[in-house]
Image (cartoon, rainbow, N blue to C red):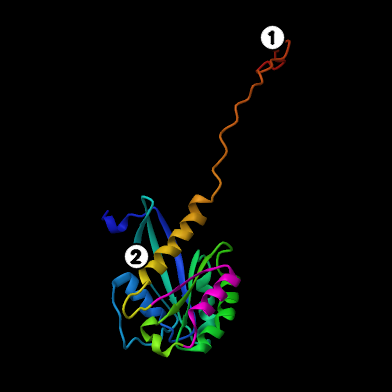
Amino acid sequence: MSEEDHYDYIWKVVLVGDSGVGKTNLLSRFTRNEFNAESKSTIGVEFATRNVNIKGKTIRAQIWDTAGQERYRAITSVYYRGAVGALVVYDITKQNTFDSLQKWLEELREHSDPHCNIMLVGNKTDLNHLKEVMQEEGRAFAEKERISFVETSALDASNVGEAFNNLLVDIYKTQVEDQPSPPPPKESNRKLELPEDTTPQQSDCSC
């Protein structure tokens, strides 16, 4: 077995958000360190994997890139099931993608794992001069929803690794560290009580 094939945990993470916010390039930047300016809209669902080491454990992140277009929503909602982490992405240069966040969160919370860790991502900081959604707005929304927040650029790789790695650390805390340890086996102090008459009983059977 190669080192790439070995892992201690495998976790499903989904990327959600409106079409065109950069989910596919965030995925390719993190898993292959690539960026494609001609990237087309995702149809249905695609996924890629990357192994990450957290506290001596190898985590295989199975990251699903879901289509943002409305016509694929019914198809892709099934892929949220079993997700223990999610990046909810908006484009900092497009206010309407920020306005859609509430519906994405509601859909995610309806279909994913009840303890799914969520991070809000404001993507495309390389276009800061075209910014429509201020960082303070993103942070305030994240605080209201009690989720993590970061701004990224898939183009120049700013904070992309940090976004995924911090999310995986949060998942590790939830899935591994916060799980209750099994109770130790109880030792009984009671002595085995034998019946007073321990004489074997003779059977009436003449077989």
Residue type for callout 1: Thr
Label of residue 199 in the image: 1
Q: Nearer the viewer, residue 81 or 58?
A: 58
Numbered range of the magenta stretch: 132-152
Measuring from the top left, give residue 89's x and y in whole percent. 47, 78
Measuring from the top left, give residue 72's x and y in whole percent. 50, 84
Q: Quick check: 154 left or right of 137?
A: left
Labels 1 and 2: the sequence-earlier one: 2
Within 10 Å of the Cα at label 2, are there few (<14), some (14-19), or many (20+) other Cα atoms?
some
Q: Quadrant of residue 44?
A: bottom left
Residue type for callout 2: Arg
Q: Quadrant of residue 39?
A: bottom left
Measuring from the top left, give residue 168's x and y in whole percent. 43, 62
Q: Quick check: 176 left or right of 194?
A: left
- Residue at (37% x, 71% y) in the render: 159
Q: Quadrant of the C terminus?
A: top right
Label of residue 50 in the image: 2
Label of residue 68 in the image: none
Q: Secondary structure at mark 1?
A: loop
Q: Is residue 129 above or below residue 181?
A: below
Q: Is residue 99 above or below residue 161?
A: below
* Residue 137 highlighted magenta (yes or no): yes
Q: Nearer the viewer, residue 94 or 66?
A: 94
Q: Secondary structure at mark 2?
A: strand
Q: Residue furthest left?
A: 2
Q: Is residue 105 above or below residue 10?
A: below
Q: Nearer the viewer, residue 127 or 195?
A: 127
- Residue at (37% x, 74% y) in the render: 27
Q: Quick check: 111 left or right of 165?
A: right
